[in-house]
Image (cartoon, helix red, strand yellow):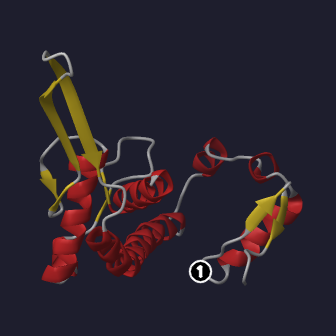
């Protein structure tokens, strides 16, 4: 039960972090799925997942329905003891696994990946446009960094730069040495 709850919670939280966030200065920026880019069914799935994140995981509202399910229920009651007195008692339940929510996540993951990639491409295109305008060299110097200090090895830096020609790349870095992800 603990593992199921951890996996379900992590899935919902990561989905929400990738698709429904605001952004402050120096953060990665806001990412919001746009209702007009989704079908009504997709928007309903998305909204219910975000509701579960907000109402059942990030904040706990006992007895409140979130995403069509009551995730937490707390009950306080009195129990008669063997000697005839009464004692206070309580019981709680919380959902560890919810099949309908998992189904929504499974349906929405490819859509979320598509939409987040589109937003990234739009943002990176704006950066590329800016870079191709006349920019003062002082601006580049202000933001210069040592890639070896950041990425750990010349081999990793080369792998990152070579991957750029394909539009995107994924590598695992282990002990500052890149290797292809498992299965690729």
For image coordinates 32% across by 77% down, the residue present is: 103
SS type, badge 1: loop
Farthest-out residue, front:
83
Relative placement, left or right, of 1 versus 89 is right
**Is 53 left, or right, of 171 in this rendering?**
left
Residue 146 rendering spot, x and y as whole percentages: 77, 47
Where does the C terminus fall, quadrant-wise? Answer: bottom right
Q: Against 48, is 1 above or below?
A: above
Horizontal and vertical percent position of residue 120: 44, 69
84 to the left or right of 146: left
For the N terminus, the image quarter is bottom left
Q: Residue 159 sits in which quadrant?
A: bottom right
Asked whether 91 or 129 is in front, the reply is: 91
Q: Nearer the viewer, residue 126 or 152?
A: 152
Relative depth, front residue between 140 and 159: 159
Q: State whether residue 13 is above or below residue 88.
A: below
The quadrant in which residue 177 appears is bottom right
Report the residue at 87% width, 60% height from top: 154
Q: Which residue is mark 1?
A: 167
Up-down: is 3 above or below 60? below
Q: Residue at x 86, y 56 (%)?
A: 153
Q: As rendered, which of 68 and 124 lies closer to the eye?
A: 68
Q: Identify the residue shown where x is 54% and y is 57%.
A: 135
């Amino acid at each position: 039960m603990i593992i199921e709850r951890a996996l379900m919670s992590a899935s919902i939280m990561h989905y929400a972090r990738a698709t429904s966030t605001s952004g402050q200065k120096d953060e990665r920026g806001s990412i919001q799925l746009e209702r007009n880019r989704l079908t009504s069914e997709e928007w309903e799935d998305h909204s219910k997942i975000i509701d579960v994140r907000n109402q059942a995981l990030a904040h706990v509202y006992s007895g409140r329905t979130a995403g069509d399910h009551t995730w937490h229920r707390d009950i306080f009651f009195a129990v008669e003891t063997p000697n005839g007195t009464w004692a206070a008692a309580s019981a709680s339940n919380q959902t560890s696994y919810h099949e309908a929510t998992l189904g929504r996540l499974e349906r929405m993951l490819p859509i979320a990946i598509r939409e987040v990639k589109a937003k990234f491409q739009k943002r990176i295109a704006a950066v590329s446009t800016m870079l191709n305008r006349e920019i003062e060299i002082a601006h580049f110097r202000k933001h210069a960094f040592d890639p070896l200090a950041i990425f750990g090895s010349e081999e990793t830096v080369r792998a990152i730069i070579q991957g750029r020609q394909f539009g995107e790349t994924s590598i695992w870095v282990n002990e500052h040495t890149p290797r292809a992800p498992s299965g690729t």
